[in-house]
Image (spheres, rainbow, N blue to C red):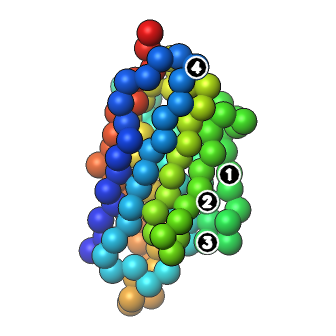
Amino acid sequence: QVQLEESGGGLVKPGGSLRLSCAASGSIFSINSMGWYRQTPGKERELIASITSGGDTNYADSVKGRFTISRENAETTVFLQMNRLKPEDTAVYYCHINLLDYRGRTQNYWGQGTQLTVSS
């Protein structure tokens, strides 16, 4: 089993910054990728940023130039630095991991979600 512990959500004013963290632990042989999704009521969860084991990053157009995904701690912790936040960034943010377990199986896990509210 794998656990993803998220932290860093909260209330921030438009134009402000915030950093989300996600630490993975458990039965992880290797990590293929980690990423951040977000979801608002009535909408599907959308990928906003991801980073592969090779360090390649991908961003949704809506956050390019404002958000930066990075990792550390033997690549088991991923961060999302969010700058120039807008009210439309308000959502529940979910950490995601795609990994190989010790049985060679590809697995996907989600964090519990953390709320970001951008409001004056």
Q: Residue at x 45, y 44 (%)?
A: 20
Contact (Cβ within 8 Å) of mark 4 with mark 3: no
Q: Residue at x 43, y 14 (%)?
A: 119
> Does residue 113 sit above or below 5 in this rendering?
above
Q: Secondary structure at mark 3?
A: loop
Q: Nearer the viewer, mark 4 or mark 3?
A: 4
Q: Residue at x 72, y 36 (%)?
A: 65
Locate residue 56 relative to residue 6 in the image: left or right.
Answer: right
Q: Earlier in the sequence, mark 3 or mark 1?
A: 3
Q: Quadrant of the C terminus?
A: top left
Residue 7 seen from this side: yes
Contact (Cβ within 8 Å) of mark 3 with mark 2: no
Neighbor class of circle 2 (other Cα within 10 Å; few <14, some 14-19, many 20+) is: many
Q: Identify which amino acid the numbered label 2 is placed on.
A: Ile
**Residue 13 in picture, x, y percent from top left:** 47, 17
Instruction: Look at mark 4 in the image and give the residue it sits on.
Output: 15
Residue 86 seen from this side: no
> Does residue 80 sit above or below 17 in this rendering?
below
Q: Identify which amino acid the numbered label 4 is placed on.
A: Gly
Instruction: Look at mark 1 in the image and give the residue it sits on.
Output: 58
Instruction: Look at mark 3 in the image and give the residue it sits on.
Output: 53
